[in-house]
Image (cartoon, rainbow, N blue to C red):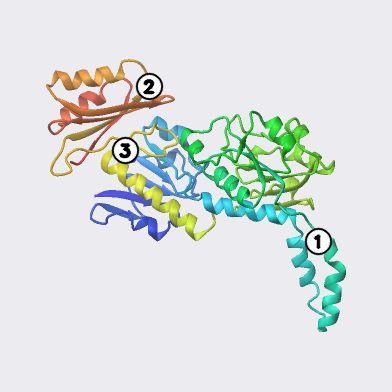
Amino acid sequence: MQKILTLNQISVKGLDRFPRDRFEVGTEIHDPDAILVRSHVLDSEHITPSLRAVARAGAGVNNIAVPAYTEHGIVVFNTPGANANSVKELVLAAMLLCSRGIAPGIEFVKSLEGIDDHDQLNAKVEKEKRRYKGHELAGKTLGVVGLGAIGSLVAEASLALGMEVLGFDPALSVEAAWRLSNEVKRMDNLHSLFGRADYITLHVPLLDATRQLINSESLKSFRHGAVLLNFSRQEIVDATALSVAIADGTVSRYFSDFPTPELLSLDQVSFTPHLGASTLEAEENCAMMAADQLIDFLANGNIRNSVNFPAVILERAGANGPGPHRIAVTNANVPRMLGQVMSVLADRNINVVDMLNKSRDDVAYNLIDIEGEPTPELLGAINDIEGVINVRTFEV
């Protein structure tokens, strides 16, 4: 029986993915095989000898001490794309709110609740409506920085609204490129995108290269009066530089899902309270995706959507009966490690049926299918190799 510890309220649809005859799931689990989490902070204190994986029901893993978990050979999963539609819809709403006087118009009409006469009310509305006149999105140019799961959906939806869409993503994957419409104009650099876009929306992960991507220097490239949307991470925008750009009119509106103290008092700035993934559907999709990834890893050793381990998927043989036994070896990514593991198997005349070896940064991960059940002595011999972090086995 595998044990799954949940540290936040996880969607029932996600929890129901775990077969109850194979998994014990709960909030009071001791020595878990895996942890399923949303926003709970996971530091090194949560690391136990039994822990094999952590799954974050969401894309960001800032609440998890990933390096510490990597050091102990613990796989950290996230769920990229599961909440993409939820964020996309909020971005579209933000663009509309920035282009039209919708929110102040609503507040104005609410202020008229003491007027009982229909004619007087309508006269007041007609007289003041010009104060809330805005612009249509159709015909405007949107610059999308980051064309992953969310950025590509925003681009597609904006094309349907009649916008011209420019995109920039130097790390665009082949899979993402296939998803992207050929109507999206790929830009070679951010300077060109900023200079042409009426609206700019950010959809990049927080990395050293993207921290304060929007700064005093990059803001010099903005078209005067541009609208900036940030639904990625607060730290991607330099708040001090942005406040100067708002004051001089370089940026006419800023809309973000990450409230920033320095910008709260500015009339041109709007914040939502981290609503990007706050839909029932997104929470369900993230929970189900996280659960499925944990189940496949704990049952087969397969790794999909890990932030610290390579993607490794090796199909299990024996669909019509017992197949080979499987071993997973995690080791430091240094030369001759795989050869040493193979030597241990060869010295014991153990035949390797299938195997897959991949690495990521300082970690290598190996799935090895062998004939015969691995003995404690065999597992101990592999584990004793200098550089091996852990050795796992899986039921046939």
> Marks 2/3: CA distance?
19 Å
Q: Name the residue under label 2.
A: 333
Q: Which residue lies furthest to the top in this view?
A: 336
252 above or below 353?
below
Q: Is residue 267 left or right of residue 28?
A: right
Tell us which disc is closer to us: 1 or 2: 1
Q: Is residue 392 left or right of residue 233?
A: left
Q: Dot 2, how many residues are within 10 Å of its Cα: few (below 14), some (14-19), or many (20+)? A: some
Q: Dot 1, how many residues are within 10 Å of its Cα: few (below 14), some (14-19), or many (20+)? A: some
Q: In this view, does 233 lie to the left or right of 96?
A: left
Q: Mark 3 points at which residue?
A: 302
Which residue: 77% across, 38% down? 223
Tell us which disc is closer to us: 3 or 1: 1
Between 259 and 113, which is closer to the camera in this rendering?
113
Q: Is residue 341 left or right of residue 88?
A: left
Which three-letter amino acid code belongs to the residue tagged 3? Asn
